[in-house]
Amino acid sequence: MEVLVINCGSSSLKFQLINSDNEKVLAKGLCERIGISGSAITYESVNCEKNTKEIDMPTHNEAITAVISALTAENTGVIKDMSEVGAVGHRVVHGGEYFSKSALVTEDVLEKIEKCNNLAPLHNPANIIGIKACMKIMKDTPNVVVFDTAFHQTMPEEAYLYALPREYYDDYKIRRYGFHGTSHSFVSKRAAAICGKPYNELKTIVCHLGNGASICAVDGGKSVDTSMGLTPLAGVIMGTRSGDIDPGILEVIANHTGKNISEITEILNKKSGVAGLSGVSSDFRDIEKAISEGNENAKSAFDAYVHTVVKFIGAYVAVMNGVDVIAFTAGVGENNGHVRKDVCSHLKYLGIEIDDEANSKRGEEVMISTKESKVKVYVIPTNEELAIARETVEVLA
Ligand code: ADP
């Protein structure tokens, strides 16, 4: 069956058409600047190279229509008409406490996603717009929602409660939710398959290190703790996000600068992290270049980043009372051998030994620990779209 995977942002829509039988990507692309002037669709398929076309897309409805036209176009398309698409799988950021797994979209499901809007005000409303656009334009095609938070719903209370007045949890559902669940689930399952051990017997730490980054302790196939929190701002240092900071800092910044909470939160999200600390960039390629040119702020940003990753790994070894596998994934985790090497050099106490030649590889599935290493360390490229397509098929089965 062909599954259309959709990841909808407030002004963008990423899509992939995946054949769920052979898991091949038939076509993929991105609609950008929806609702803004200069909107365009970028598209590539097994029948054509990547190309960009300007199309007027005042709303997500026109974006979905543009995706359908691209997928069904005479020479460059990959299907005759949309009846060939068996289902649409939507990435949804926040499922709150309502969803511990993926779900078929119904009125009730949509209502619950809407109830989570206040937990992810930038993302959930956009996800809902995408779902509604598909329901309107592809009336007979089932829609499935796959949540970033669902995998972490197995966390025990002691891992998800914040030590705030109890009513904040009871009344407002303020707690740790965690994100990147689709990736943590995909990578931890793959890790079990590669090392040939039953998933439900393995202790795995997944380091999803992209622009956004989170670390997850997966014990016996269940997320038992993760570094992101109520929002994706918490945890390790990220490209532009601060990760964990002393909450008292907010008032101190406010007193110094006169900025309000929203303005400071914006700074914590967009101007902090490796970018803020280095003053160079959020991109690790730029950071490494600056380090090689002797930029000390870039070096200290790199070191602080590694330090936070090391701290979370150490914490999760303690939480799980051991670890069998550590897996690196996402942009930095898949491509940056220096980050991996520096992180692992702090983990010798676990009996971890890194094979430098294997670690010099980029973007491919590889074991980077030596045969003798007591803990296996892998690089496992994540594939959230494929994971969403698999979930979609499973929900419909
Ligand atoms: P996002 O969270 O936006 O999906 P990514 O997973 O693409 O982010 O990660 C972005 C980071 O990955 C950047 O810091 C970038 O330096 C790094 N990265 C991505 N591709 C490469 C590459 N080929 N070589 C080195 N670093 C890379």
Image (cartoon, rainbow, N blue to C red):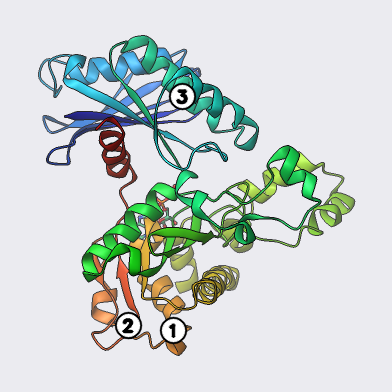
**Callout 2 amino acid:** Ile
Taking the image as shown, residue 106 lies to the left or right of residue 275, namely left
Counting other residues with Cα less than 10 Å from the Cα at mark 1, is it few (<14), some (14-19), or many (20 or more)? Answer: some
Given residues 79 and 397, the one toward you in this image is: 397
**Callout 3 amino acid:** Arg
Tell us which disc is closer to us: 1 or 3: 1
Task: State how far apart marks 3 and 2 are (Cα).
Answer: 44 Å
| Secondary-structure class at tag 2 | loop
| Secondary-structure class at tag 1 | helix
Q: Is residue 245 above or below residue 42?
A: below
Quarter of the rendering occupied by the N terminus? top left
Residue under numbered circle 3: 33
Residue under numbered circle 1: 345
Residue extending farthest right: 255
Q: Is residue 5 above or below residue 169?
A: above
Q: Position of residue 310 (x, y in %)?
A: 52, 74
Q: Position of residue 99 (x, y in %)?
A: 49, 38
Residue under numbered circle 2: 354
Q: Position of residue 17 (x, y in %)?
A: 23, 31
